Amino acid sequence: MQNQNGFKNGVVVPNSIRPTDRALHPAWSAFIHYCFELEHGEIETLKIQDGLPVLAEVTRKKIKFAL
């Protein structure tokens, strides 16, 4: 649980990524947009740094050939 001083479980949480912020960080917005464009597939490795998505290392798109 995060307190008013920006600490969560003894770790300082930067103001830019606190869950109380109403705006979505551009990195999360870009990741969500990427997932939307992917439609179906897998992201095997997602690197998170300072609470933000940084890199999806392996991504596959699946195409289903069934009716």
Image (tube, rainbow, N blue to C red):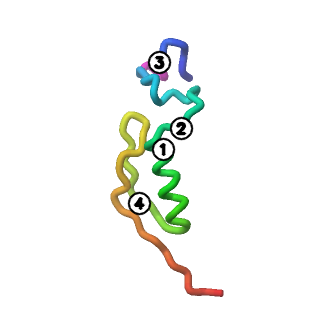
- Label 2 Cα crowd, 10 Å radius (few <14 / some 14-19 / many 20+): few
**Is tag 2's residue or tag 3's residue first in the polypeptide sequence?**
3
Quadrant occupied by the C terminus? bottom right
Q: Are marks 3 and 1 in contact (CB under 8 Å)?
A: no
Identify residue for label 4. Answer: 44
Q: Is residue 33 above or below residue 48?
A: below
At 55% from the left and 59% from the top, the residue drawn is: 36
Q: In the image, which is nearer the foreground, mark 3 or mark 1?
A: 1
Residue 24 image offset from top left, x and y in percent: 53, 38
Identify residue for label 1. Answer: 28
At 46% from the left and 49% from the top, the residue drawn is: 30
Q: Which mark is residue 39?
A: none
Residue 48 lies left or right of residue 9; in this view the side is left
**Is tag 3's residue or tag 1's residue first in the polypeptide sequence?**
3
Instruction: Tell me the kind of residue under disc 1.
Output: Trp
Residue 50 image offset from top left, x and y in percent: 38, 34
Instruction: Tell me the kind of residue under disc 3.
Output: Phe
